Amino acid sequence: MKRNVILKHRLVLFFVFFISGCALGQPNLEGVLESFLNTEYLQKNHIRSVTIYADFNEDDITTHGGYGGKIAEIEYDDNGNQIYRLTSDNHGNLPVIEYGRGSKIVVDSFDLNNNKLYTYTETYSYFEQEIYEYDGDGNLKSTEYRRDSDIIVKTAFVWSEGKLIDTKTLYTGGIGKNTATEFNTEGRIVKHVSLDYRTDYSYERHGDTLITLKITHRSDSLYETEEYVTNTKFNKLIHYVRKNHRGELEVEMKADLDTFGNVVHYYLNDLTERYEDEPYPPITITVENEYNAQHLLVKRLFYFTQKGVGTDMLTKVERYFYDSEPLLFQLKKGALTEQEMIQEDFDGR
């Protein structure tokens, strides 16, 4: 793969990381628990859709039983790219996906060269879009992030002879004033400055591991430090540490993956979540992943441990069903927000 192609994919991945995890929000520390379905094996087995069912309970299923239902529907194109995903957050109307508050739609589109054109995400309360544009040479020309049709941030990339030489980031909605973002020649952010904050980024790569150090200052004083360790082969955050200005630990997440990219051990210690002025004890999740002879994930068992709650409690079992045909039905864009408006009228809200 040519260097500019690698850089292009890196920019696309980083833009998602930038808008969702670093500059404009907090990292998704539970994202690593989501299943990784390998594109190579999906293509080899001519898979076009996957349906996931689960039994789950906050208590031990082996003692209390569990609720069961469909929690995800996924469709892929001929190249193994995910183009549609409907998921439930397990707070919908059991035992099936609730087409409303318990659901999220993600729609992706790709061109003939396998370049991602956009990602559309919708829940009951909002929708957002990540839009990518390419020049005639296939270089990423611009990225755009919209929320509820408003453009929040747009970044333009300038190339010369296949090399990234300049970037320009524009913000809207008032956050553009006194705001600036700098990228390096690898397409990674190195500095983000706003009215009250300045954040500096540094990077170290070791094989398939990328370490990102993020240091944020408020005015001239240290505000917090964050370290992200990402498995670039599977694009999963596997270690995260956040400390306050005194160097005291606030949050730590650690995860171990199997050879197929699915988590087998997960640890989260969030000292900012408190009950009666005491932090909640850390949680540990152990996952047993089962694969068939074609290396397709078929079953996952989740065991939950937390002091005062229980040890190695079986709280969820996921089962995966594969089909060589696309999904028979897909929710259309706007369906979840429309369903919410109907529910609000019904409730008289």
Image: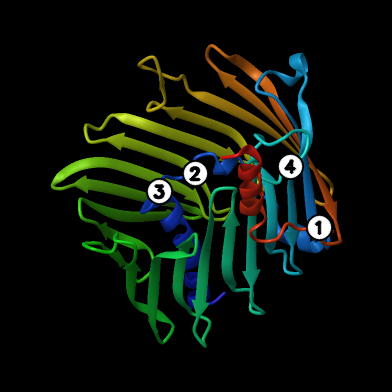
- Label 4 vs 1, first from the N-terminus: 4
Q: Give the alpha-carbon distance from disc 2 to disc 3, as whole Å.
A: 9 Å
Q: Give the alpha-carbon distance from disc 2 to disc 1, as whole Å.
A: 29 Å
- Label 2 vs 1, first from the N-terminus: 2
Q: Callout 3: 10 Å neighbours few (<14), some, many (20+)?
A: few
Up/down of 15 relative to 111, above or below: above
Q: Is residue 205 left or right of residue 300?
A: left
Up/down of 280 relative to 82, above or below: above
Residue located at (64% from left, 77% from top): 111
Up/down of 22 relative to 148, above or below: above
Q: Where residue 25 is drawn, which disc sits there? A: 3
Q: Callout 2: 10 Å neighbours few (<14), some, many (20+)?
A: few
**Image spot of residue 288 (x, y percent):** 70, 33
Pointer 4: what residue? 97
- Looking at the image, the residue that sits furthest to the front is 348
Instruction: Assign the N terminus to one quadrant of the image.
Output: bottom right
- Label 3 vs 4, first from the N-terminus: 3
Residue located at (32% from left, 49% from top): 214
> Closer to us: mark 2 or mark 1?
1
- Label 1 vs 3, first from the N-terminus: 3
- Do residues under tags 2 and 1 come within 8 Å of each other at their CB atoms? no
Residue located at (67% from left, 35% from top): 90
Q: What scheme was used to colour the molecule?
A: rainbow
Q: Amino acid at mark 1?
A: Phe
Q: Secondary structure at mark 4?
A: loop
Pointer 2: what residue? 28
Pointer 1: what residue? 329
